[in-house]
Image (cartoon, coloured by chain):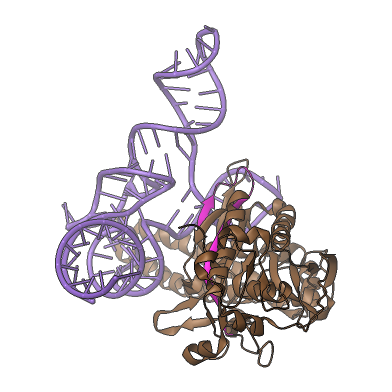
Chain colours: A brown, B purple
RNA sequence: GGAGGCUUCGCCUAGUCCGGUCUAUGGCGCCGCACUGCUAAUGCGGUUUGGGUUAAUCCCCAUCCCGGGUUCAAAUCCCGGAGCCUCCGCCA
């Protein structure tokens, strides 16, 4: 939810933001009208209530002879109040509806344009050269006994997979590495629920125009999260946080579920685009004035993680038309996939400003002890399946082996490479 | 799944049976002022959170877990729901 004061005082800023996103500008005027209508309804109901309250007290004090007349007046007012409250309720609902339709206001620095207009900020790491035919992650993974797509489809359908043997060990190694690095950087590790109530889903902005992306458990009115961002943002809903000494940071682990509606034909091969994967997500609660710096920090941690995995990548600044509902600004990191000869999104970090906090009612106390809206940011530390895919491709060797980056070795029994038919007991940390 | 208990303005708490100065009591904590060489102690005052209105103050409305209902009037009565606790059943 955007700041209503901003809409009232600077509607043109919001209109410009809508235009940049390619969204409907007239929603701003609808919101302004709904806001004015609500305030009028509130005033009317408040005044009537005050009158009615006085009348009600007069009933008690009235002498017996006056009582019937006073009571009559109180009853009449009560009816009016009821009607005014009804009008207020519908005005409130109309305002909320109009309010929810408007996505976050894009930051000034965001590049204009759509999906193809992201600006590359930098490219890091040398592209690997292979003097043998490059294979994609499925060929490599299946040869290693690390990925089983066929049985994934048998058990759960398209876009499902099993990670087996070295693949399963790789998942745990990545998770351990990600969590360890996050804890060292000051994050609190969190294992988050993957099923959440509608409020959490709506609060993080996932139930708007993209709600067909989300799995819903209708019978229990719960949703499967597409990222632990949802649960972690919801974790402090309706709270007043203590944010005296900088951001409060969590590293959340959860399974993530995505319907991938509308992506038919995209990435149908492999585990790059799947209905379910596990992920370590960074999440930050901070003061609004801290978000720009915090966003860059999250981005830096993401980059350092990919550097530790020895993966070449580039950082892109996402254009306005491609921003999510909650984001004011977003950076993606795209890593190199040799089989595609292209950079593909591996991680992403968004500055949501106060947008999510306003929906979820997350506040903090300022220097004067007054509650203020907090700000939220999120960033992928490691989306496991896609990262495994990238690792297998980039670090493939001609003999079907896969090089293990040094940072991962402590979690894989110290092995320097994964090889087809290898002994699994060698690839686990000492028991 | 079944039975019972609990939920009050940061924390604890009075009030709920029997509706109306509840404009919610008291303690702790916190803030300010006074007093005092300093600290402590003491005294006085303040201290929920939203919304409306306003240049600002004032003022008004809402808020006793949430949502309905009864009533001129609800923390209080009725119905529904949530969360927590205890016991039983089931389960990893």
Question: x, y (%) of residue A275?
Answer: 56, 82
Q: Dividing the picture into quarters, in which one does residue A378 lie?
A: bottom right
Residue A233 visible within the image: no
Pick the front one: A218 or A96? A218
* Quadrant of image for the N terminus of chain A: bottom right
Compared to residue A427, the image places residue A130 above or below, namely below
Compared to residue A257, the image places residue A356 above or below, namely above
For image coordinates 81% across by 75% down, the residue present is A20
Pick the front one: B16 or A28? A28
For image coordinates 74% across by 81% down, the residue present is A24
Pick the front one: B51 or A19? A19
Question: x, y (%) of residue A193?
Answer: 46, 68
Q: Dividing the picture into quarters, in which one does residue A268 lie?
A: bottom right
For image coordinates 43% across by 68% down, the residue present is A77
Pick the front one: A181 or A205? A181
Question: x, y (%) of residue B69?
Answer: 33, 74
Q: How many marks?
A: 0
Question: x, y (%) of residue B84?
Answer: 32, 58
Horizontally, residue A238 falls left or right of residue A331, namely left
Compared to residue A264, the image places residue A226 above or below, namely above
Residue A250 lies in the magenta-colored region? yes
Q: Which residues are magenta?
A: A238-259
Residue A291 visible within the image: yes
Residue A61 lies in the magenta-colored region? no
Horizontally, residue A392 falls left or right of residue A146, namely right
């Amino acid at each position: 939810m955007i700041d209503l004061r901003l809409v009232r005082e600077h509607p043109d800023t919001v209109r410009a933001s809508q235009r940049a996103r390619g969204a409907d500008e007239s929603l701003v005027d609808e919101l302004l009208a709904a806001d004015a209508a609500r305030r009028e309804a509130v005033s009317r109901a408040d005044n009537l209530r005050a009158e009615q309250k006085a009348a009600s007290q007069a009933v008690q004090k009235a002498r017996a002879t006056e009582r019937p007349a006073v009571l009559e007046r109180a009853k009449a007012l009560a009816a009016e109040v009821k009607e005014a409250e009804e009008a207020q309720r519908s005005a409130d609902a109309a305002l909320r509806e109009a309010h929810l339709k408007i996505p976050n206001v894009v930051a000034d620095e965001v590049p204009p344009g759509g999906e193809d207009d992201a600006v590359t900020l930098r490219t890091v790491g040398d592209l690997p050269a292979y003097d043998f035919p490059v294979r994609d992650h499925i060929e490599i993974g299946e040869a290693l006994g690390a990925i089983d797509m066929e049985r994934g489809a048998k058990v759960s359908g398209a876009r499902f997979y099993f990670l087996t043997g070295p693949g399963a060990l790789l998942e745990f190694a990545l998770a351990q590495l990600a969590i360890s690095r996050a804890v060292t950087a000051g994050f609190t590790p969190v294992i988050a629920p993957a099923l959440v109530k509608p409020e959490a889903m709506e609060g993080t902005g996932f139930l708007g125009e993209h709600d067909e992306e989300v799995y819903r458990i209708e019978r229990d009115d719960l949703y499967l999260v597409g990222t632990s961002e949802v649960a972690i943002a919801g974790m402090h809903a309706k709270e007043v946080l203590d944010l005296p000494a900088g951001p409060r940071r969590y590293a959340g682990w959860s399974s993530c579920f995505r319907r991938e509606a509308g992506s038919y034909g995209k990435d149908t091969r492999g585990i790059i685009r799947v209905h379910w994967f596990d992920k370590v997500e960074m999440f930050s609660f901070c003061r609004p004035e801290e978000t720009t710096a915090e966003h860059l920090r999250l981005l830096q941690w993401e980059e350092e993680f990919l550097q530790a995995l020895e993966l070449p990548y580039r950082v892109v600044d996402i254009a306005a038309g491609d921003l999510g509902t909650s984001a004011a600004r977003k950076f993606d990191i795209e890593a190199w996939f040799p089989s595609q000869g292209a950079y593909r999104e591996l991680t992403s970090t968004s500055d949501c400003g106060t947008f999510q906090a306003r929906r979820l009612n997350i506040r903090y106390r300022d220097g004067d002890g007054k509650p203020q809206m907090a700000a939220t940011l999120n960033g992928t530390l490691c989306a496991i399946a896609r990262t495994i895919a990238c690792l297998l491709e980039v670090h493939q060797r001609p003999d079907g082996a896969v090089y293990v980056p040094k940072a991962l070795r402590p979690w894989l029994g110290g092995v320097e490479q994964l090889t087809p038919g290898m002994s699994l007991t060698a690839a686990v940390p000492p028991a």
